[in-house]
Amino acid sequence: MPRFNLDFRFPVQNPEDVVHRYRAVLKEFRRTRSMSLSCEALNVDRNTIALTAIIAKIFIGAEGEDFGQLPVFIEGETVGNYAKTCKAFLEGNQLLRKKKKKKKNNSELLPMKYKF
């Protein structure tokens, strides 16, 4: 039985939805210490989180700091294609990569790799 009254069964439409879902899974992960249990509790597919995690990691990592112009989400673009754009952006931004790694080591991000 889900711990939260959230319904993540429907596809996300934009990066804000991705970040919202990611934060919900992160909050549940801190409680359960298991990705599988966290995703199951929120009724989210683990592979979906893995495919879109890069978007959330960039937005969370860039909060409060200036890392240049973040990739722009174009209306009508798929979230999967936007994730690939974000991955290319992250690979080209050394400072953001270091901050993401630091946050991941401090358990401020989910411990998962990207799947493309």
Image (cartoon, helix red, strand yellow):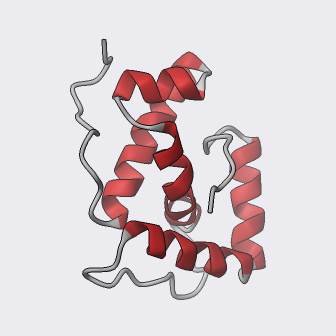
State left or right for residue 33 relative to residue 94: left
Measured along the vertical axis of the image, is residue 63 above or below residue 2?
Answer: below
- Toward which corner of the image does residue 67 lie, by quadrant? bottom right
Q: Residue at x 49, y 83 (%)?
A: 71
Q: Quadrant of the N terminus?
A: top left
Q: Is residue 61 left or right of residue 82?
A: right
Give the image location of residue 41, x and y in percent: 39, 21
For the point 66% across and 74% down, which residue is it? 90
What residue lies at 45% left-to-right and 46% top-to-bottom?
22
Instruction: Say which residue appears at 26% left-offset and 80% top-offset.
Output: 76
- Report x, y in % for residue 33: 62, 21
The picture places residue 13, in percent across and down from the top left corner, at 27, 63
Q: Nearer the viewer, residue 71 or 35?
A: 35
Say above or below: 102 vs 42: below
Q: How many marks?
A: 0
The front one of 101 and 79 is: 79
Residue 8 vertical placement versus 85 (above, below): above
